[in-house]
Amino acid sequence: MRKKAKGQVALPFEREPGPPVVTIEPGPERDHEVVIALGAWFDGAARDLPWRRTRDPYAIWLSEVMLQQTRVETVIPYFERFLSRFPTVRELALAELDEVLALWSGLGYYRRARVMHLAAREVTEHHAGAFPGDAAALRALPGIGAYTAGAVASIAFDRREPLVDGNVARVLSRLEGIDDDIRSAAGQKLLWQAAARLVPEARPGRFNQALMELGATVCTPRAPRCGACPVSGHCVARATGREEELPVIAPKREVPSVRMVAAVVWAGSRVLLARREEGGLFGGLWEPPMVPSDSIDEARTLLADAGIPATLALHEAGRVRHILTHRRMEVTVARAEVSEAWRCRAKLASPYEKASWLDPSASEVGVSTLARKIVSTASPSAAWAERARR
């Protein structure tokens, strides 16, 4: 530390000589410059995505539901298939849940599809098939929170509504220099306050999409491309050299492991699948019967209770590992064959509501990625192997 002249008082905030700290002056002028710069950048840099070619609130809502915790490139073919099969919210509402889940198969987070179906029915029954433009009315629909309501209201209806998703949270935490954990209540409050302050009266949907696009393509979690950022001159993290430190995110808890054993039983060319009861993990989806255990004997007991012979020759076909958001699953896969005569005799208890012998190439029911992996492990069937890779 440098020496002080005689009689000089050392102030507690004094710093050693070094690079000057750039000061970001908050206020309406800075906010306006951020809005202008971000909008101009978005007009030239935005990716051409199918849901950006429409102002239809149904299509925008559908895309936002699908994009939750799912990559854009994964969503695009599902989005296009859904709109082709259900071009209006009314047609989605009239569909059977099994058909909706079948189209959703492989996209994951299946509760989204179930709640989306409920919301479509409510829009059809209580809003005459037209989405409300008011964010509060949108939030009253099943499965629609503040983010989705803000997206639909601003993009489809030009309402001045903020939104905060993972990408926006990262952008705003750096832009504003937010030191709170962005998942905490305090951090979320600051993020939403910043989003509400910045969103402009004119073209709010364009601004909100620009924030999301910036987070997805430039202001990335690691190695942000600050040199390509249109608002780097207004960014607190950039000015203070904390681009890599922000956002603050508390470590996640360790994901618990769950062991299961699955029985893949073939009768000729058909496989036994059971439909899970509504609610809970994989609710409403079809899968080989499973039980919490890593013992094939438990699978044999499960099948015996369903009316399939206890003398069934089950043998281990392999193991499947599958990671979900809140758990890690390891499934022992047991394979067996029965005669055609047993095809109509299976009846499983809770958590299954019904069982059926299905052609492995069938796509009329919802089947999770985990279930596809399990059946593929116990079968040389090209159809199931192909579905497992999707």
Image: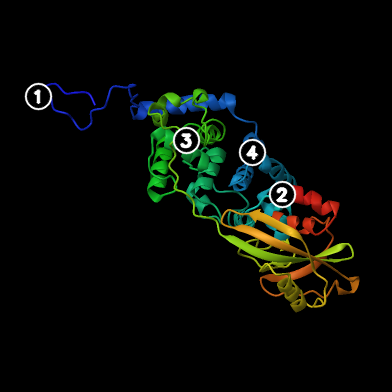
Numbered badge on residue 7: 1
Mark pair 1, 2: CA separation: 80 Å
Q: Residue 353: image x %, image y %? A: 70, 71
How far apart marks 4 and 3 lie (CA) works out to 22 Å
Q: Amino acid at mark 4?
A: Trp
Q: Is residue 212 left or right of residue 262?
A: left
Above or below, 20 against 185 in this view is above
Identify which amino acid the numbered label 3 is placed on.
Val
Residue under the point 45% across and 28% down: 35
Residue at left offset 68%, top offset 42%: 74
Distance from disc 1 to disc 3, alpha carbons, whole Å, reads 47 Å
Q: CA distance from mark 1 to mark 4?
A: 68 Å
Question: Mark 3, residues whose alpha carbon is within 10 Å: few (<14), some, or many (≥20)?
Answer: many
Of marks 4 and 2, the one in the foreground: 4
**Label 2: few (<14), some (14–19) or many (≥20) C-alpha neighbours in 10 Å:** some
Which of pointers 4 and 2 lies earlier in the amino acid sequence? 4
Numbered disc 1: secondary structure: loop
Q: Which amino acid type is shown beneath numbered disc 2? A: Phe
Q: Earlier in the sequence, mark 2 or mark 3?
A: 2
**Helix, strand or loop under label 4:** helix
Q: To which residue does mark 2 refer?
A: 86
The quadrant in which residue 100 appears is: bottom right
Looking at the rendered structure, the kind of residue marked 1 is Gly
Which colour scheme appears in the figure? rainbow
Tell me where residue 147 appears, x and y as whole percent: 51, 46
- Looking at the image, which is closer to me, 351 or 5? 5
Disc number for residue 51: 4
Disc sitting over residue 171 in the figure: 3
Residue in view at x 53 percent, y 34 percent? 220
